[in-house]
């Protein structure tokens, strides 16, 4: 994914733009085969919009999404449909993705039917995938309403897998579940990833969830990427004050950082309608300097595959650390 951006504009009845929200601003990242790329940030930071841009559920203003040598953003019709089949999404609320008037089996078979598989073959495959996610055969004729949240999410996962995707995008897929059920769902994702050789984009506001699931983590704030690193590096040494604050604000995380001792994330996310000038985090950042209001920090490399966008880390600083 390179340099993808999206600004939502609302217009008045005369067609004049009345407000603009820069929801995703120049975001780039690389998802590696059979790995998990985690995206973390508070709600409203652009994580879900980013996922929808990649899948073209929303059209991007610019950028590229390269998959198997094709730019998904430039394709249309049959070509796009074929490639998009490889990328399936699992959402937070399985109620919205499951059809209440269909049995579980038919819910899972449905994407195959839409793609031209016969009724019978679709149902045979659906049985297999329901089994893979731990829904017993005896439950296949039940309806979504009769299930618990955890079971419903299993069915939604089966439905995403039935098309044999290569990539699964999970957007807050376990956030609505109780903690105990959450752990089961995460285990299930792990198992399925191995069994079906999936590459995953795992989106969550919860650092724990992202840590458990991801190989690489990208931290977003108000539509911008503020830090990207391997999961080990970001947890061993988070550079960006926002990443550090996220750790401090997550009770059971045992990460200490001298400079920011005691700093917890406070204050509301500023309105994306009117983001702060310069660094968008500066209104909540205890380290903010004059330059932070004037210049938007660019992502710079602070370690192997570790990038951060913050004026605290200039090129000189990085060079010094390397010595
Ligand atoms: Fe804080 Fe400035 Fe870094 Fe932004 S650029 S995170 S305001 S120190
Ligand atoms: Mg979201």
Image (cartoon, grey):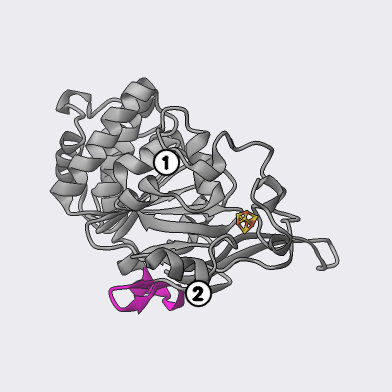
Picture mark count: 2
Q: What label does residue 161 carry, if any?
A: none
The answer to whether residue 137 is left or right of residue 71 is left
The quarter of the picture where residue 91 lies is top left
Identify the residue at horizontal 51%, vertical 71% (top origin): 316
Secondary structure type for disc 1: helix
- Residue 220 x %, y %: 52, 53
Between residue 305 and residue 64, name the one nearer to us.
305
CB of mark 1 near ligand 2 (< 8 Å): no
Name the residue tied to disc 2. 63
Which contiguous range is marked in magenta?
66-80
The answer to whether residue 267 is left or right of residue 317 is right
The answer to whether residue 263 is above or below residue 81 is above
Decide whether residue 79 is among the magenta residues: yes
- Residue 55 x %, y %: 43, 61
Separation (CA) of disc 2 from disc 1: 28 Å
Name the residue tied to disc 1. 97
The answer to whether residue 289 is left or right of residue 137 is right
């Amino acid at each position: 994914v390179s340099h993808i951006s999206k600004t939502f504009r609302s217009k008045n009845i005369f067609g004049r733009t009345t407000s603009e929200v820069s929801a995703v601003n120049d975001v780039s990242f690389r998802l590696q085969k059979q790995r998990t790329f985690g995206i973390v940030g508070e709600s409203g930071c652009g994580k879900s919009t980013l996922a929808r841009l990649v899948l073209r559920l929303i059209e991007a203003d610019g950028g590229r999404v390269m998959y198997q040598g094709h730019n998904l953003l430039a394709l249309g019709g049959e070509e796009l449909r074929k490639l998009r089949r490889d990328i399936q999404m699992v959402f937070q609320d399985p109620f919205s993705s499951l059809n209440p008037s269909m049995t579980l089996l038919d819910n899972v078979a449905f994407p195959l039917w839409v793609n031209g598989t016969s009724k019978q073959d679709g149902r045979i495959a659906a049985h297999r995938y329901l089994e893979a996610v731990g829904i017993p055969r005896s439950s296949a004729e039940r309806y979504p309403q009769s299930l618990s949240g955890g079971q419903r999410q299993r069915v939604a996962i089966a439905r995403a897998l039935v098309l044999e995707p290569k990539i699964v995008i999970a957007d807050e897929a376990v956030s609505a579940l109780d903690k105990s059920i959450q752990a089961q769902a995460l285990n299930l994702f792990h198992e399925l990833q191995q069994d079906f050789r999936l590459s995953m984009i795992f989106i969550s506001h919860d650092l724990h969830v992202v840590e458990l699931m991801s190989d690489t983590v990208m931290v977003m704030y108000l539509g911008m990427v503020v830090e990207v690193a391997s999961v080990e590096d970001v947890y061993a040494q988070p550079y960006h004050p926002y990443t550090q604050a996220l750790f401090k604000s997550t009770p059971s995380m045992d990460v200490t950082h001298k400079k920011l001792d005691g700093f917890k994330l406070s204050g509301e996310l500023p309105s994306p309608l009117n983001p702060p000038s310069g660094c968008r985090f500066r209104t909540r950042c205890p380290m903010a300097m004059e330059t932070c209001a004037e210049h938007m920090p660019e992502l710079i490399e602070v370690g192997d595959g570790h990038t951060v966008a913050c004026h605290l880390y200039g090129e000189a600083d990085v060079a010094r650390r390397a010595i």
